[in-house]
Amino acid sequence: METTVDVPHPAPGRPHAPRVPWSPRAWGQAVRLAGGIVVQVIPWLLLTLIVAWGTSASHGQWRYRGWLLFVLLLALVTLLLIPALTRVHRHRLRTAGIFIPPQPRRPDQLTPRGIVATLRSQPLWRQVAYHLLAGPLLGIAAAIALALWLGGLLSATVYLYGWGLRPGSVFRRATYPTDGINAQHLGHIPAGVFLTAAGIIALAVAPAVTAAVAELDARVGRSLLGPSRAEELAHRVEHLTQTRAGAVDAADAERRRLERDLHDGTQQRLVSLAMNLGMARTQAATAEQAQQAIADAHDEAKAALAELRDLIRGLHPAVLEDRGLDAALSGVIARTPIPVRLTVDMTRRPAPVVEAVAYFVVSEGLTNIVRHAQASQAEVIVQRAGDRLHVIITDDGVGGADPARGTGLDGLRKRAESVDGTFDISSPPGGPTLLTVDLPCVR
């Protein structure tokens, strides 16, 4: 079994196309964006076929059934094809570095009520407007931009054609063995100069035009294919409500754990210490008995101190605040009974609350590995990339970890969500298990 916990993506910033049209990277990105718009012809082709079929089927004795089938087919295409094309365009824009968040899926979208609600939803009709109205216009603009590239390239190299098609040339004999073309027309000086100049101008303008089309495509796609600002805010509020409830539950569970550890561990040690000291006082007449009671009390005191240190270390160790994640996690791994490889790559420390969550994730994750995974080794990678902190924990255990079975994984998910992070686990039977937590570095 492979278990994945999905957490909503953070809201992206405004998409943007290349703003420096003269750089090779910007040219390639703009051409890729413009060239991908050719898929806009698909909905119009299908719409034409459906309308033609519906028109032909609506005549004769089957006209009423034909119209009914036409309406049903149109609704089916709207429900299935439009979202599929939207996913294609989101992926196309994502390859250019522009992320458009998907619309939240309705849990009842396959029921009659869900289908009706989907057909009446604003996001679906914004997508229809993109594919049937905005998309074709963007496709025309992209075709103009690509025509500037192709036409400019052909015109700017017109003298190469004249040289290649000169009488007696190898290219001339291979291409036009009957000598049916006059290469002097292509090499005529006024026409050649004009075509070459026009081609150079077209090639000079093409990158800026293509970048402008790519920018327009990104803006239109973001406004029509993604959620509106109001929908983003509503989704954000819902997500924050859920994560706040999860944080409250996690804090309550942590409080109960502390109470249980103090009651069952440290408190019992201190009670035993008091009893041993009392016995030593009452048995002071016998030196050997008093020494034995004092020795037992000393052992209990050391055990109680050790448990208190472990308890405090589990909450927020001082080394984490003083020296950071690398030193704190090194201490955790040193106490782990199986070999663990640690890699920490951070140029700057994240926010203290994020650092504490990362520490707790690694500490609790290794505890779960020792208790449940039957692993012989594990690896922990903590890496900062931009404003995100990635925590990856792997082991070679038996796998099959499931957050729903109460192995502490649900608590890790709630910890990550409490700081707007994401949690993902892959644990097929037989292993290996891969746990990935992505946290924002700034809060």
Image (cartoon, helix red, strand yellow):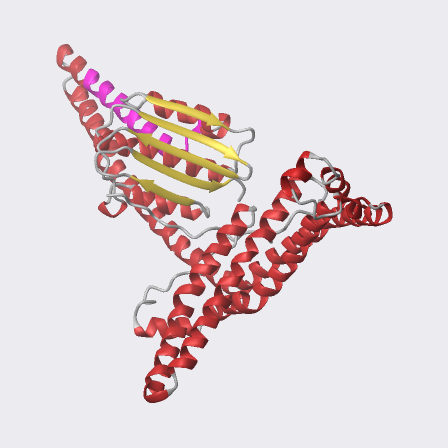
Locate residue 151 relative to residue 335 in the image: left or right. right
Q: Residue at point 70% right, 44% down?
A: 179
Q: Is residue 315 visible?
A: no
**Residue at the bottom extreme, as displayed:** 61
Q: Which residue is nearer to you in this view: 105 or 424?
A: 105
Left or right, 29 with reference to 291: right
**Start and end of the magenta stretch?**
294-319
Q: Is residue 81 above or below residue 323?
A: below
Q: Quadrant of residue 176?
A: top right
**x then y, percent, for residue 306:** 30, 24
Q: Position of residue 303 (x, y in %)?
A: 25, 23
Provide the major secondary structure of the magenta segment.
helix
- The reply to whether the magenta stretch includes residue 300 is yes
| Residue 417 is a magenta residue | no
Q: Please, is residue 14 above or below residue 373 in the view?
A: below
Residue 388 seen in render: yes
Relative side of 176 to 193, left or right? left
Q: From this viewpoint, which residue is outermost toward the front?
A: 178
Which quadrant of the rendered structure holds the N terminus?
Answer: top left
Q: Is residue 401 above or below residue 142?
A: above
Q: How many marks?
A: 0
What is the residue that sits farthest to the top in this orientation?
288
Closer to the camera in the image, 408 or 138: 138
**Residue 114: image location, x then y, percent:** 34, 71
Residue 190 vertical position relative to residue 57 in the rendered view, above or below: above
Q: Position of residue 391 (x, y in %)?
A: 42, 35
**Residue at the location (51% across, 39% down)?**
388
Q: Would you say 93 lies left or right of 394 here?
A: right
Residue in the foreground of this view, choosing between 47 and 20 = 47
